[in-house]
Amino acid sequence: MSKKSDENPRIGVFICHCGSNIGGLIDCKKLAEYSGTLPEVVYSEDNVYTCSETGLNAIKKAIKDYNLNRVVVASCTPRTHEPLFRECIAEVGLNEYLFNFVNIRDQCTWVHMKDAEGAYKKARDLVKMGAARAAKLEPLDKVSVQIQPVALIIGGGVAGMSAALNLNNQGYETHLIEKEDQLGGRLTSLHTLFPSNIDASELLANFVNKIQLAKNLTIYISAKLRKIDGFVGNYSVEIDKAGEIIKLMVGIIIVAVGASLFIPKHMLGYDGKKRITQQELEVILKNNDLNTNNIVMIQCVGARNEERSYCSSVCCMTALKNAIFISNKNPGAHITILFRDLYTPGTKYEAMYRKARELGILFIRYTEKKELKVEENEVRVFNEYLGEEIIVPYDLLVLSTPLIANEDNKALARLLKVPLESNDFFLEAHVKLRPNDFATDGIFIGGAAKWPVDITEAITQGYAAASRASTILSHDVIEVEGTTSYLPEWNKNLCSGCEVCIKVCPYKAIIKNEHDEIEIIQALCKGCGVCGATCSKQAIEIKHFTNEQILSEIYACGGRDVY
Amino acid sequence: MSFEPRILGFLCNWCSYAGADLAGVSRIQYPPNMRVIRVMCSGRVDPQFIFEALQQGLDGVYVMGCHIGDCHYLEGNHEAIKKFNMVIKFLSIVNLENRVRLDWVSASEGVRFSELVSEFIQDIKNIGPSPLRRDCPDKRLMEKLKAIERAAASDRIRALVGRERKITEQENVYGEKVSQEIYDELLNTAIHDEYIRSRILILLEKEPKSVKDIAAEIEIDPNKVLENILVLKGRAQVDMSEIVDITPIYVRT
Ligand code: FES
């Protein structure tokens, strides 16, 4: 932006019904009519889906027909749909920053479903604020950044290895860091894999073999991310490999750190010997050490409760797999599975359940309400159908415990500046629209780092993350947001040289140059806006979030005609 | 008395705005009294925005950011706290401090977001409508708030708050750190001084006045007024225009 644009704003407002998501609660037609009465708004309409081909064409047509130079869409949320609309107006020659999004779904109709009138008033205010801001928008240039065609994958489990191999096959220099002293992640502790029944060690060997043969793929074991700086295409990272510090420049980062197993300390008599976890059972099976006939498995131990409300999704299948394996090997074995609900989705997993029943494995339902009693050699379980307690004897008790978030997720999330969800798993940008991205450009996610997944899903997600990453790596240069801060020419005389901006900038993007003037280095600035809010003369402007723009929203919100 | 408060929220893009969206995706219901302005970081919220919102007659202002340690821009929310504390100190002069609030909401805390917003709406309902509501704003209070906004925008206050973390958290070249108490004292004095000075300036902008008249209007000791007039004279912001009888009359330059 070099100068303030002086053409008069001609705003078009588009109100999206989002099917019935918005239109089912509030009168979008009326809202569109209201929008038409707002200052500088020369055109308004409502659309069933503004983001559909029809809706986008309607925007383009209106821009041409009414000579619009600003567009407002009131719809879902900018976090998912802003890029689409920006692109749309750019296609007909408008600068993409002359677009403003108004959130009337995620933050309005979806959260005020029982108060249609209140929701309408709120939507009306938000559109009014949005149009006021739109009138003050300025065209901006995007910033071009060079892309380092180098990938960094954090986590050497199945998901991480799949992603690394995939990117490496596409020809990108790839680095994989694993915190343990060997590759494989959870694969190293598994015996066989469902539903194919192949040996986990076989799959692992296969992966490791490919990795060893790969050129331009570097593995760092016993290594952790220590520091990160930079932005999409240009992350400079420091890896701590058992004390040795390695510095890299990478273009993208994939988080594939997997998950950990919950150890049921002080629960149901767990002792790691006679009462063990499924994982410990796998080790016994691997070593061919099982020498008992009476086995009881308990599902959902430490899962789907108040503390951990989620379903770990792999434990039912793990129990079935192990039970079937044992029973095939030793048809005389008595195996009982105590479950709360059994989840065996899809064609293959349900088939395994049927198979287990055919093999004579017993399934007994228990409820959360009546606690299981684990005695030295028997479990007492209250069965709701019978209305009485059943006593099930055992020699070996196997507890199915959930996968939980790694303890160091928090530290990693803070380093990368990406969010965690309430159970400390990593949180993707959007569950459906961007399931393998973080909101931060150039950082991706796959596998059980996000929530518990089985091996098949981990591989799929590893590929998915890799393919998302290659949408960046395949470019030499990409364009990123131009919404940085700057000291406009016309404000230079305001600057008193107090240098507080230099002190508060977290990125050292502000310097005093050789002419003794404050200079903001655009490439380093990330546009947080703290310098603008701090500047003792309010001389620094934040592009796309200027004082003028924000104040116009405040004033529009303060207007007297509501309530 | 029940009324429907009008509240303005400033939400940072990366955590609290995402948390608000998540409340929507999860269909968690809360009352529709808050309007939201999206900013990139809670540290972007210039104190001026809050004062302006209150002058608009809005009943409450909510600033929300990422939890400490989670700010997408490393420490923007630390800066937000400093600015917010200053805002609170100023608003306490006119008893409006409980109409503004600062909280942290992560991208996964849809429930927390809706609870906090509901709570704030209820608290504001309990306090009652803003005395600055559009239909019958308290003019005296408005004048005081204008003075506050101006004082908060002064170099002295902005630079002091901008340097707070540097001053209190890092040692100077002599290896000393200023304690939080000493800093607070400094800030309190500055706030007090600049507030009075702004009030004087605003009065003088309307018409030239004597020290006595000014003191009567802003209800403080004439000696204090004189003291501040001298400072303002030194800053070339006021001047003596004439002497009526033996009383000097001051004007805004
Ligand atoms: S980005 Fe949320 S507080 Fe800084």
Image (cartoon, coloured by chain):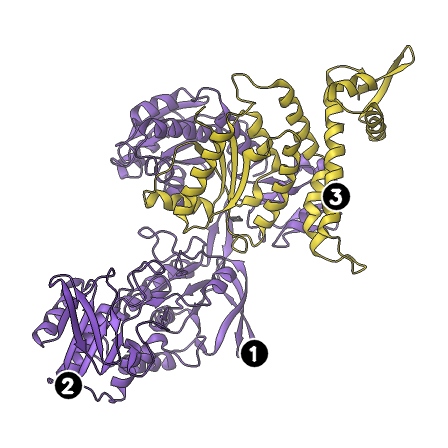
Residue annotated with mark 2 = A329
Nearer the observer, B239 or A342: A342
B172, above or below B46, in the image: below
Q: How crowded is mark 3: few (under 14 residues within 10 Å), some or many (20 or more)?
A: few
Local SS, label 2: helix
Q: x%, y% of residue A280?
A: 31, 80
Q: Give the residue furthest to the front.
A: A388
For the residues labelled 1 and 2, the Cα–Cα distance comes to: 46 Å
Local SS, label 1: loop
- Chain identity for the colour purple used in the image: A
Q: x%, y% of residue A260?
A: 37, 70
Confirm if mark 1 falls within 8 A of ligand 1: no
The amino acid type of the residue labelled 1 equals Gly
For the residues labelled 3 and 2, the Cα–Cα distance comes to: 79 Å
Nearer the observer, A527 or B18: B18
The amino acid type of the residue labelled 2 equals Lys
Label 1 is found on which chain of the structure? Answer: A
Q: Residue at x 56, y 54 (%)?
A: B74
Confirm if mark 2 falls within 8 A of ligand 1: no
Q: Residues within 10 Å of mark 1 (few under 14, many from 20)?
A: few
Foreground mark, 3 or 2? 3
State which tag comes first along the sequence, 1 or 2: 1
The amino acid type of the residue labelled 3 equals Glu
In this rendering, would B112 be left or right of A350? right
Residue annotated with mark 3 = B185
Chain B image colour: yellow
Residue A159 is labelled as none
In this rendering, would B210 be left or right of B74? right
Q: Are marks 3 and 2 in contact (CB under 8 Å)?
A: no
Nearer the observer, B135 or A204: B135
